[in-house]
Image (cartoon, rainbow, N blue to C red):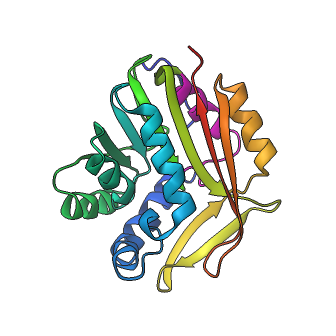
Amino acid sequence: MRAHRIDRPADLDVVRDSYDRVADNYAHMVLSTGIGDIRRHPWQKASIDAFADSVGGLGPVLDVGCGPGTVTGYLAERGLDVSGVDLSPRMIENARRLHPGCRFSVASATELDLAEASLGGVLGWWSLFNLPRAVLPQVLALFAHALKPGGHFITATHVGDVDAVRTEAYGGVPVRWTTHKWRPEELVALIEEAGLRPVAELRLPGEEWSGPGVVVMAERPA
């Protein structure tokens, strides 16, 4: 039995199918345009670099919602013991193709069985916004449980007051998912309630292809 019971999102299967449909287009977009590749976005890359510096030597790192493995591969190049998981089997197929030296598996953030104090770091990098509002706190509590004292969590997500229902994405592919948007102070409060101590916050302005966002890094107190 898992240490933390997490409610299964009602739309999990629909979201999985949607990401399966867009996985190939998304992977191609990252490779061809740099959108979604932290190497092309200096401040996001700096956030990931700070995370990597903070968790180096603390143990395994888990990239939750890794998509085609872009950040997983980058952290592996930096020498971290990192693996990735994603809800979408097709995303994982792309990740394994693009980053054959990394470890990937199919799993939802709500299905993970993580032992206490087993991880040096956890990422939820632009990957937790599909979780229903009642479910995200449960997932954050699991991450806090899984981190070693001194281990770090980093997340990036969309900022706003109104959720958005997507019906097409990445080249007009039909999809169905909800982007749950958070005010930065709301997200930070949830992270604190999960038992983590926020250590950094970065506000990101809206861009041509995306609205405003926020990056938050937090640690499990020693």
> Is 31 situated above or below 43?
below
Answer whether residue 38 is magenta in the image. no
User: Nearest the camera: 76 or 49?
Assistant: 49
- State the image coordinates of residue 222 (x, y, percent, origin top left): 56, 13
Q: Is residue 184 left or right of residue 167?
A: right
Image position, residue 34 (x, y; %): 42, 76
Residue shown at 44% from the left, 16% from the top: 116
Residue 125 location, x and y as percent? Answer: 51, 51
| Above or below: residue 164 compared with residue 151 | below
Q: Is residue 135 visible?
A: no
Which residues are drawn in magenta? 127-144
Q: Residue furthest top?
A: 222
Residue 59, compared with residue 213, is above or below; it is above
Q: Is 202 situated left or right of 77 in this image? A: right
Task: Residue 18: give x, y in percent of width and height.
Answer: 46, 67
Q: Quadrant of residue 203?
A: bottom right
